[in-house]
Amino acid sequence: MIDTALADLGRRLTALGLTERAVKQCFGVPALAHLPRALPHRSDPGDKAPRAAAVVWLLCAGRAFPLDAMRELFGADLARLADLGVLAIDGARVHARYALAPLGGGIAVCDRLDHAGADAVMWPDDSSHHLVGALPLARVARWLDVGSGAAIVPIAAPGRATAIRASDVAPRAIELAALGVALSGLEHVTLRVADLCAGAGGEWNLITFNAPIPAEAGGPAGEPAHRRAPAGARVLERFWAEARDAVSPTGEVIVHSWVPNDPLALTADLPGAVAVMRYAREPGFAITAWRPGAPPSRKVVDVTLTEAAPHVVRVDVDRALAG
Ligand SMILES: C[S@@+](CC[C@H](N)C(=O)[O-])C[C@H]1O[C@@H](n2cnc3c(N)ncnc32)[C@H](O)[C@@H]1O
């Protein structure tokens, strides 16, 4: 059931200027993922920052502001956000304990950008944007998002399914996802702590997974070490085996992952159509799409990303799957 108090709070935060567009404009980035890299180069807005800037510097970038200014900005919501553990009042200053990521019309709750622990619930990164970009545009009935983290992908694209199950092996991720889903007012997203597809049952029309990066893959330039999983390659093997049982025969599976030199190696045994949209080599990173019920085909496409089009998009997937 929808928590109307939290959904209203989310709407008020959006009205105060916590929007994806505002974050991109304020920090001069084309996508939320680039905020951590841009931040060290932005000039500090000062304690007397205009309201719109203060909202995103406080809630997204982690800057502390004077208590008086934050009382004026948030009114009674300051105490609500402190009760929720999102904000902390520290003497005469207020800081955010988490980072709020405005995505589409919703808000995801992640760890702060300066949280370097291995258990960090990640702020959207390029991989999140690649996966969102690759989603089918038409609404499906049932969508399973595995390794959902803060439920970034469902929160960014909640209209793509009538019912969504978002799960992650990390209980902290699901705790933060629950707050984000509530602030986003999403009634049709169910959250579970689960290892891959365990307990999800079958007949999913869409299954998505933004897989952890295996330590052996190195990682894209600038990728923090804590985002890599020592058993990442094995996780992918297990995922593909489980997805086979969980997906509907007419469904689709979309994965963002590291791919080996032979990008089709991990999906070689699958029936139907597999297309790999590889956007980086050495190490290889790609979106892999699988339609079990489509006529058998295998395709690897190298996608060129540009500054204007920095992420894989659905047209890339449709073209590749169409052969
Ligand atoms: C690269 S992050 C993706 C987070 C989010 N889906 C996104 O796109 O921004 C990978 C996520 O997979 C989760 N994960 C790792 N191993 C898992 C497993 N065996 N079962 C479920 N989730 C797992 C991690 O906890 C992490 O949240």
Image (tube, rainbow, N blue to C red):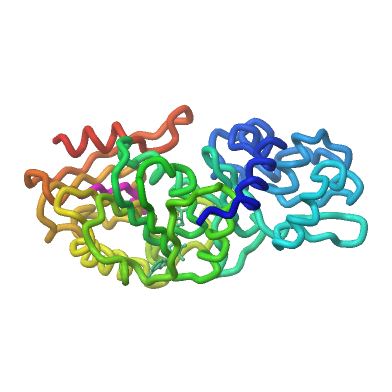
Residue situated furthest top in the rendering: 308
Q: Is residue 172 above or below residue 260?
A: below
The quadrant in which residue 130 appears is top left
Q: Residue at x 21, y 43 (%)?
A: 300
User: Does the magenta portion include 284?
Assistant: yes
The one of 1 and 304 positioned closer to us in this rendering: 1
Measuring from the top left, give residue 43's x and y in whole percent.
78, 38
The quadrant in which residue 134 appears is top left
Q: Quadrant of the C terminus?
A: top left
Q: Is residue 110 above or below residue 276?
A: below
**Residue 247 horizontal side relative to residue 190, left or right:** left
User: Does the magenta portion include 42?
Assistant: no
The one of 167 and 275 positioned closer to us in this rendering: 167
The magenta stretch spans which residues? 283-290
Measuring from the top left, give residue 239's x and y in whole percent.
28, 65
Measuring from the top left, give residue 190's x and y in whole percent.
43, 59
Is any part of residue 22 visible from this angle? yes
Q: Residue at x 19, y 64 (%)?
A: 245
Measuring from the top left, give residue 59's x and y in whole percent.
70, 48
Q: Main secondary structure of the magenta part?
A: strand
Residue situated furthest left in the rendering: 295
Is any part of residue 282 visible from this angle? no
Q: Residue at x 65, y 33 (%)?
A: 22
Which quarter of the rendered image does ligand 1 occupy?
Answer: bottom left
